[in-house]
Every structure is written in C-alpha cells, then in structure tokens.
Image (tube, grey):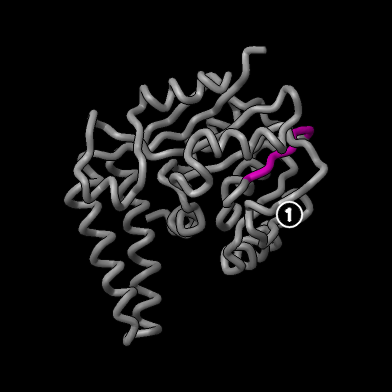
Amino acid sequence: MDLEFYDENKYLISMTPADKIIEAGTVLGLNDKCSVLDLCCGYGEMLKLWAENFNIKGVGVDRCTEYINTGNRHLHDAQLNNNITLIAEEVQTYITDEKFDIACLCGVGDLFGGIDGHISMLERFIKPTGKLVIAECFLNKESAPKELREFEGELYTLYELYRLFSERGWYVSWLSTGTNADWERYISWEARRTIEKIRKSPDDKRMLEWLDKWYHMYFKYRREYEGWGFFVLERIW
C-alpha cells in the first residue's frame, strides 16, 4: 500500500480522485498567474493539489473551523501557506473585493439554492473571463425512490444538469463522472470519520444512527441511482 497516497486521501472530501482534479487543472490552464476561490473548501485539499502542481494562488472558505485549522496546518507543513489562504467563515456571508480566475463550489447539494443559486454565487467572484468548477450528484435514472429524494433533495440527470448550465450561459468544457471505486472511497472515508467520533463519544446514539443511515442510503439507493460529476464550465462569449 502507498501509505503517503492513503494519507492524502483523508483530506480530500470529494468523490473525484486527486489525479482527475489535477487533470482538471491542466484543462483550466492553471499556472502561477491564476487565482482560485474554493467555497466550502473542506481541508483545502483541491487548492493544495493545484498549488503543488501549478503554483496557483488561492483562497478557501468553509464554515467548519476543524477543517480550516487542520487544512492550514497541512499547508504549512507542505510550505504552501504563502500560496493558499484558508478562512473559517459562512460562505453565504463571505465578501471580498478580489476577482478570481476560477471559482469553485463542490458537493453541497441544494444548500445554496440548487444549481441556479450556486452559479449566481460563483459569478459574483470571477473576472469577466473567469471559469467555474462545480461538482454535483446526479441521477443515473430518470426517477429516484422517494427515500433518496428526501435524503438528497432535488436531483437532476446528467442531461438536465447540462441544460441548467447552458441556460445560464455556461458550457461544459471538461467533466469527470465518478466510478463505484470513487463512491466507495468517499463513503468509507465518511464512515471512518464517524466511527472515530463514536469511539470518542460512545453514548452519542444520534451519531450511531447517522452511521447506520449513511450506509443504508448508499447500499440500498445511492450506489444504484446516483452518480457524481465534476464539471469545468466556461462561457463562449
């Protein structure tokens, strides 16, 4: 086992693997003159990967102080804290005068108003020639069971996502859709985190119930009905 790669994966809160994120960076044309904003950045691992491979400058924002503090330590250890700044703040209230070459929002469901709301939020932060990165779950089938819809909120097919992007004037210039192996890596990552929390708080029955539900939804519904897409979006004009 490549222990270094295994350790890196625990910071990557995504069903898109590291090699595909780096490939996306190549498609985006990232270089040392590019600035990137990642909203709901988690540990900031996507920004870290792009800083290591393309020497970008970036800002990550996430409400979870645990993620931000751990991510900043990780960046410091990798001597990348001059490239990347991670900020603990509510994404909805984040304000900056800076305009970025790339703005990203990955894997938050309909938390900020669905696709339309996500695009509107990202558009506030980019230059006129800026590009977007959005990662979303999608339906592999035309319809989903009620239990999955209640768990996930509104889900679209891959074609419906394309139509929603294009209606806002954005076109998919690159995409990566997840495999079962990517799902398993992500689901197992979440399970390990929850198991660790339960061991620290063995009387927390809600946490155990969540773990049971997490696996129930994956094995019964999500594996069959749900896909994951990582999209690079560009305007034509």
Q: Which residue is found at the position 50% from the left and 24% from the top?
A: 165
Q: Which residue is found at the position 32% from the left and 85% from the top?
A: 202
Magenta run includes residue 34: yes
Q: Nearer the viewer, residue 123 or 17?
A: 123
Q: Nearer the viewer, residue 22 or 92?
A: 92
Q: Specify few, some or many for label 1: CA neighbours under 10 Å numbering under 14, 14-19, or 20 or more.
A: some
Question: Given the current orientation, which residue lies at the most extreme right position?
Answer: 97
Question: Given the current orientation, which residue lies at the most extreme top position?
Answer: 237
The percent coordinates of residue 148 (x first, y second) are 25, 48
Q: Secondary structure at mark 1?
A: strand
Span shown in magenta: 33-38
Magenta run includes residue 76: no
Q: Amino acid at mark 1?
A: Thr
The percent coordinates of residue 64 (x first, y second) are 57, 64
* Picture quadrant where residue 157 is located: top left
Name the residue tied to disc 1: 85
Question: Given the current orientation, which residue lies at the most extreme bottom position?
Answer: 203
Left of 121 or right of it: where is 193?
left
Q: Nearer the viewer, residue 70 or 91?
A: 91
Magenta region's main secondary structure?
Answer: strand
Q: Which residue is found at the position 71% from the left and 62% from the top?
A: 76
Q: Is residue 123 above or below residue 1?
A: above
Q: Quadrant of the C terminus?
A: top right
Left of 148 or right of it: where is 182?
right
The percent coordinates of residue 149 (x first, y second) are 28, 45
The percent coordinates of residue 69 (x first, y second) are 64, 67
Q: Is residue 158 above or below residue 44?
A: above
Q: Which residue is found at the position 40% from the left and 45% from the top?
A: 15
Q: Quadrant of the N terminus?
A: bottom left
